[in-house]
Amino acid sequence: MTNIDKLTRIISVTSNIVFFGGAGVSTESGIPDFRSTDGLYSQKWKYPPETILSHSFYEQHTSEFYKFYKEKMIIAGARPNKAHYKLAELEKAGKLKAVITQNIDGLHQMAGSREVLELHGSVKRNYCQKCGRLYDENFILQSPDIPKCLCGGIVKPDVVLYEEGLSGDTLSSAVYYIEHADALIIGGTSLAVYPAAGLIDYFRGEHLVVINRAPTPRDGRATLLINGSIGEIMGEVPVDPSGQ
């Protein structure tokens, strides 16, 4: 029995699945990750990306922040890949209860997923820090320098920067879904970013599936470990949730 067969079998016998994903889910859509050999952390900038994407840098060097953010964090024209679409199909079929993602690109929703918990926010949402008015990512891209609201306030992306805390409500919902899941599929993440990666500790279900190109700290706990592309692997799972 191949790994695809084993994964199909797990999905066919389980009706309470949760997916936990990271940057690897979106790299096949042309969105670079941060920690691969050619990721943002490996590229040369005036400041390190982790410095630019910090709350203090945003406050002290707002214009410089937006130059980087517009160029590297908003990927115009990015489209969902096989992994995104398969997860949406599984949710529609009643198998998948939630997608918990560390990504900020909004591709899960674009593919049709409804219950998406965005741990680190989304580039699709932006808000005025003065009056709360909402703006989309096109407003940010089209702003000549620092995005300003009609009221004059600065428009900030609804993404979690370094030094900022994750949403308590989002974390609570993620814990609930993982605690109650019968199967947890982890895909496209190194599980190196905390506190997000620590959510895995709440899983008490039967099937822990890890799909990733590189080793993760949870490989030893996995009931099914598949090394490879999350898009290619999920794309091979039959559309019929029964596996027939």
Image (cartoon, rainbow, N blue to C red):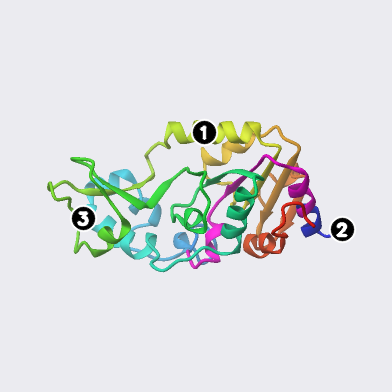
Q: Is residue 155 above or below residue 27?
A: above
Question: Whole-percent x and y of residue 156?
Answer: 27, 48
Amino acid type, mark 1: Ser
Secondary structure state at the residue bearing disc 2 = loop
Q: Left of 114 or right of it: where is 128? A: left
Secondary structure state at the residue bearing disc 3 = loop
Residue 147 is tagged as 3
Evaluate whether residue 188 shows in this view.
Answer: no
Amino acid type, mark 3: Pro
Separation of marks 2 and 1 at Cα, in angstroms: 35 Å
Q: Is residue 150 above or below residue 39?
A: above
How packed mark 1 is, by other alpha carbons closer than 10 Å (few <14, some 14-19, many 20 or more), is some
Separation of marks 3 and 1 at Cα, in angstroms: 32 Å
Q: Earlier in the sequence, mark 2 or mark 1?
A: 2
The residue positioned 38% from the left and 67% from the top of the image is 76
Q: Is residue 73 above or below residue 56?
A: below
Which contiguous range is marked in magenta?
8-31
Q: Name the residue tied to disc 2.
A: 1
Point out the image quarter for the C terminus: bottom right
Q: Name the residue tied to disc 1.
A: 173
